[in-house]
Amino acid sequence: MNLERVHNASRNIAWGLINTFLIIICPFITRTVMLYTLGDLYTGLNGLFTSIIQVLNISEMGISSAITFSMYRPIAEGNIKEVCALLQYYKKCYRFIGVIVLGVGICIMPFLPLMILDDLPRDVNLYTLYLLQLISTFLSYELFAHKISLLIALQRNDLISKVASIVKVIQTASQICILIIFKNYYLFLTVSIITSIGENIFNAIISVKRYPEFVCNGDISKETKKEIYYRVQGMLFHKIGGVALRSIDTIIISSFLGLSALTQYQNYYYIITGVTSIFGVIQKSLIPIVGSSMVTEGDEENIKDFEKINFIYIWLSIWASICLLCLYQPFMELWVGNSYLYSKKIVLLFVLYFYFFRWCDVVYIYQEACGLWWETRLCPLLTAIVNFILNIILVRFIGISGILISTIISLISCYNIGTVKVVMTQKFKVKNGISFFFKKQVQYFFGGIIAALACILLCNIIILPILEQFLVNLLICFFVPNIILYSIWYRSEEIRSIKNLLRYILKVRI
C-alpha cells in the first residue's frame, strides 16, 4: 500500500474519530436534555422529520459520489482544468437538486399527519417545524456543497472534520441552552439551520485558501457527462436501498406503533448510529485512498490491500458488536431508566442488525471507490422491496422485532451477496468470488461468537450495582475479545501484514 496514501488515511481517520466522538456525544447530550425537558413526543417527532428528509435526499441520486469519483484520475494526473470543469458541473447540479428537494418537500406536507399514529404536542405546528427542517436541507444543497467534494477527492477529509467538530460543539451548546432556558423547539431547529450555513461557508473558505487553483470554471466533455449519468443511474438504486433500510423503518414504526414506540426504538438505534459513525469515518477516509490505488496499482496489489483492510475492519466490527451485546442494557438503564428498556432478545437483534450492516462494508468501500454503482444497481432495489414488504408484514405481528429481522434478512439475502459477486468477480477477477469472500467472513463470524460467549459468561458471573456493572463490563469488553481474537488468528498472514503497517502508522506524524 502506497505510504503517502497510508499517511492520508491515518490523518483523515484520526481527525474523523475526533469529529465522530463529538457527533456521538453531542447529540446524545442534546437528546437526553430534550427527553427530560420536552418529552418523548418531541424526541420521536425529531427522528421522524430526519427520516423524511433522508427520503427526500434520494433526489440527490448520488451525483456527489459520481463526480467525486470522476475527480480521482484528473487529480492524480494533475489535470486542473478538468477538475475545475467538474466542480462547475457539480455546482449547477446541486443548485437544481436543491430546488427539486424544496418543491417535493412542500408537496408532501398535506400527508404529514398520516405518518403519525398518536397526537402531537399541543404547543407546536407540524407544518412550521417541517418547513424549518426542509429549509435547512435546501440550503445545504445551495451553499458550497461542491467545495466539500473537492476536499474529499483531494483526500483532505481531516479539514472537513475539523470544521464539523467546531460547529458541532457550538450547535450543541446553543441548543442545550435553548432547551433548558426557553424549552422552545422552534428555536432549537433554527440553531440547526444557522450552524449548517456556517459549516458550509467555513468549508468553502478553507477550500479556496488551500487550493486556489481549483475554481468553478469550464465545461466537461460529453463523454464525461455520459459516464457521470451512467454512474448516477446506478447510484439512484443505492440511494433508494439506503433509505429503505434506514429511514422507512422509522416511518413505519411511527405509522403503526406511534411516536412513543419510535422514541424507545431510536434510543437503542441512536447507540448503533453512534458506533456506526465511527466506522463511517474509516469508510470515508478509505474511499478516496482506494480509488486512487485502483487507478494507479495493479490487481495483485489491490487484492492484497483488500484482504488486509477487510481483516482489520471485521476485527473492529466483532469487537464493537461484543461491546454492544454486553454494554447495551446497563447503559440504557443508566441513561433512560427501566421504563425504556427492551428485552434481551431485541437487544440481540439490534447487535446482529449492526454486525450484518458491517459484514460487507469493505466490499462497499471498493464498490464506491471503483464506481460500480450501475453494475450493482439491482442489489439495493431488491433489498428495498424485500425490506419494505417484510416490514409491513412482521411489524403487525412481532412489532420492533419484525423491523430488525426484516432488515437483517434483506441485507444478507440481497444486498451482501449481490454486491460481493460483482466486486469480487468483475473487478478483482476472482473465480468463485462469493465463495472466496464469504468463506473467510464465516470464519471470522464464528471467531467472533467464541469471543462473545466468553465475554457474556464473564459479565454474567459478576453481579454488581448498575454503574459498577457497566464499568466492569466495559473493562471486560476492552481486553477479553481482543485477546481471544488475537489468539485465534495470531499466525495468519493478515496479522503479520497489519503489524508492519501499524509500525509505519505509529511513526507517522498525524
Image (cartoon, rainbow, N blue to C red):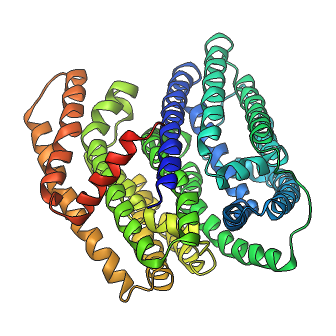
Quadrant housing the N terminus? bottom left
Q: At x 56% / y 78%, what residue is drawn?
A: 376
Q: How many marks?
A: 0
Between 388 and 230, which is closer to the camera in this rendering? 230
Q: Is residue 275 left or right of residue 94?
A: left
Task: Please indicate, yes or no, whether residue 164 appears anywhere in the rendered image.
Answer: yes
Between 63 and 238, which is closer to the camera in this rendering? 63
Taking the view exactly as shown, the residue that stands out farthest to the right is: 218
Task: Please indicate, yes or no, whether residue 346 appears anywhere in the rendered image.
Answer: no
Position in image of residue 468 (x %, y %): 20, 22
Between 23 and 245, which is closer to the camera in this rendering? 23
Taking the view exactly as shown, the residue that stands out farthest to the left is: 461
Quarter-wise, where is residue 362 in the image?
A: bottom left
Position in image of residue 355 (x %, y %): 35, 57
Q: Is residue 234 left or right of residue 427?
A: right
Position in image of residue 219 (x %, y %): 91, 67
Q: Is residue 129 left or right of residue 12?
A: right
Q: Is residue 175 above or below residue 144?
A: above
Q: At x 83% / y 43%, what residue is drawn?
A: 143
Between 34 and 39, which is closer to the camera in this rendering? 34
Position in image of residue 474 (x %, y %): 24, 32
Quarter-wise, where is residue 80 in the image?
A: bottom right
Taking the view exactly as shown, the residue that stands out farthest to the bottom is: 431
Q: At x 83% / y 56%, what residue is drawn?
A: 94
